[in-house]
Image: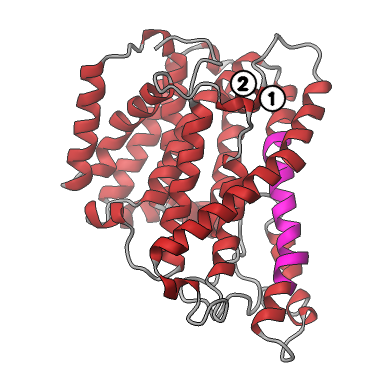
Amino acid sequence: MERVERDNSFTFLRLIFALSVVVAHSFALGRFGLDPLQRASHGQTDLGSLGVICFFIVSGYLITASALRLPIRRFAFNRCARILPGFIAVQLLTVFVLVPAVIQWTYPGVAEYWDCFVLEPDSAVSYLTRNAFLFIEQYKISFVFTKNPGNVAVNGSLWSLGPEAFCYLCLALLALCHGLRHRFASVLVFAAVYAAHVFATANPAAFMKLLLPLGEGQVQMLNSPIVRSAFLGFAAGMVFFQFRERVKWNGWLFGGALLGLCGTLFLKGFSYTWPFFLPYIVFALAFNLPFKRMERWGDFSYGIYIYAFPIQQCLALPGLFPQGLPGLGVGLFITFSILLSCLAGVASWYLIEAPVLRWARSRDRSTVPKPNGAAEALVS
């Protein structure tokens, strides 16, 4: 599986992963029941969770490459340049554009923007301050979206940014300790996270007791199966990068991994087996799919991911259509969600993310040549 870094379809796969999250949230926010994968897997996982795990697998691979190549200060600067501008933009647009528009639509002549801007609980100001450092502590803003059928969260997708930033921090600390120079350190990290994941899955009550000294916030985060899976996916990506020259592409291995994943997915045991099957499938697709030039157009996945949830909440507003858009069926709800989310992702890339990344690269004259376009945004 050894390839030059630009010879991959990571940009395409990230787009697919983002869209899988949009589809999963369509079922939840429109109250259409369980999504197809959730029904088929008997509740073991869903399209959104699987998409997020795959995101973290790819991120672990690419960010490890960046941590090994760059000085630590440059690594931290690049990570901030990649994740913060889009996050800040979506938060500001949410509070100063989306919220007043929703209030005017939902409560015309009854409530005003000021009512939810500073008045507690769950004011718009506290939404900005409590979520300022990527770890999302407040999902609701006053009475916004309280009439929606599925969820009152303004942007439920942002939960993953905190764990992602935590993974960056741990990787930076490992680099500072020269742990990344020893490839088996990534195996130890993966083994430790996997052991914790297995223990928590098999004995959730005992795992919670172990977490109690950490504090309420950490307990809630680490007790969440999807958060633990995100950490585990990132660790798996680290291992694959460190041993990338030894991993060989083989159709039989791919078929076996796919069969093993599907077997546990549709029967039982998915939580225990996906860390061994799913990463190989993801990287086999990344280095063999014929979509290696998509980075020329840009990487829209991050923008799609962070804007889709509030867009879907707006589509679910009562009165938007005679019975609300969900009343027209899941197919139309998914179609509108994908179209509008893709438009937001493209706008976010060209207006915010790409300009910031170009500025960040212009400040870096000391590193080795890097791939062009969106691939550079992923690796750097």
The residue lying toward the viewer, choosing from 136 and 206, is 136
Tell me the quarter of the picture where residue 70 sits: top right
| Disc 2 secondary structure class | helix
| x 42%, y 53%: residue | 223
Res 256 seen here: yes
Q: Is residue 80 above or below residue 202?
A: above
The residue lying toward the viewer, choosing from 375 and 180, is 375
Three-letter amino acid code at the position of disc 1 = Phe
Q: x, y percentage for residue 245?
A: 42, 8
Q: Is residue 160 above or below residue 361?
A: below
| Disc 1 secondary structure class | helix
Position of residue 228 in the picture relative to residue 205 (left or right): right
| x 64%, y 16%: residue | 371
Pointers 2 and 1 in contact (C-beta within 8 Å)? yes
Three-letter amino acid code at the position of disc 2 = Ala
> Residue beneath label 2, please?
67
